Image (tube, rainbow, N blue to C red):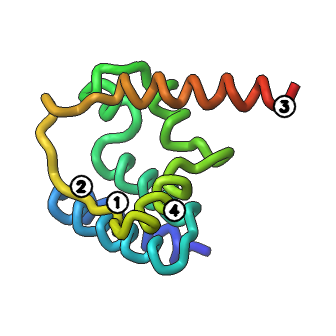
Amino acid sequence: MRKMGIWREYLIEKLADRERAINYLQAILEDYQIFEDSTVVLRSLHTVVEAQGGISELAKQANMNPEILRKIITNEDSPLIDALTVVLKALGYQLSIQPTHPENLNLEAYTDVLETQNTSTQIAEN
C-alpha cells in the first residue's frame, strides 16, 4: 500500500506543472471516452486540484466559496461528464482539455446549474 502513496506523491509533484496537468487531464478524458469510467475522471481531477494548490487555492482563483467548489468536483450522484459525453458522442464530438486564462472562468454559472440539479433531485426524491 505504501507504493501507492509514493506514486500519488510523485504524481502530485509532477502535476504541479500546468502543462503536465493539462496533458494528464487530456489523457484521462481520452481514456474516459473509451472506458466511460467517470470515477477515474473525478479522482484524476482531485489529484490535479491537489497538485495545483488544493481546493482553497483554486476557490480563491475562481473567486468562489471553497465548499461550493468541493461539491462541484465531488458530485458523484449524477456525474455531468457522463451526460455530456452521451450528448457529444451523438453529435459526433468529444471532450478536450485546453488551457484558458483566469479572466475567462465562469464557475458561478456552473454553480447555479449544480444547485438547480440538486434541487431537482431532491424534489424528484420526495
Q: Circle 1 sits in a helix, a strand or a loop, which is it?
A: helix
CA gap, disc 1 to disc 4?
30 Å
Left or right of residue 98, residue 88 in this image: right
Outermost residue toward the right?
126
At label 2, the amino acid type is Ala
Depicted 19 relative to depicted 73: above or below? below
At label 3, the amino acid type is Glu
CA gap, disc 4 to disc 3?
24 Å
Q: Are marks 4 and 3 in contact (CB under 8 Å)?
A: no
Which of the two discs, 4 and 2, sits closer to the camera?
4
According to the picture, the residue beneath numbered tag 2 turns out to be: 16
Q: Picture coordinates of residue 104 (x, y %)?
A: 16, 33
At label 4, the amino acid type is Val
Which of the two discs, 2 and 3, sits closer to the camera?
3
Of labels 4 and 3, earlier in sequence is 4
Q: Which mark is residue 22?
A: none
Residue located 31% across and 32% down the image: 57
Which of the two discs, 4 and 3, sits closer to the camera?
4
Q: Which mark is residue 86?
A: 4
At label 1, the amino acid type is Ile
Q: Picture coordinates of residue 85 (x, y %)?
A: 47, 61
Which of the two discs, 1 and 3, sits closer to the camera?
3
CA gap, disc 1 to disc 2?
6 Å
CA gap, disc 2 to disc 3?
41 Å
Residue located 18% across and 58% down the image: 17
CA gap, disc 4 to disc 2?
31 Å
According to the picture, the residue beneath numbered tag 3 turns out to be: 125
Q: Circle 3 sits in a helix, a strand or a loop, which is it?
A: helix
Q: Which mark is residue 12?
A: 1
Q: Are marks 1 and 2 in contact (CB under 8 Å)?
A: yes
Depicted 26 relative to depicted 116: above or below? below
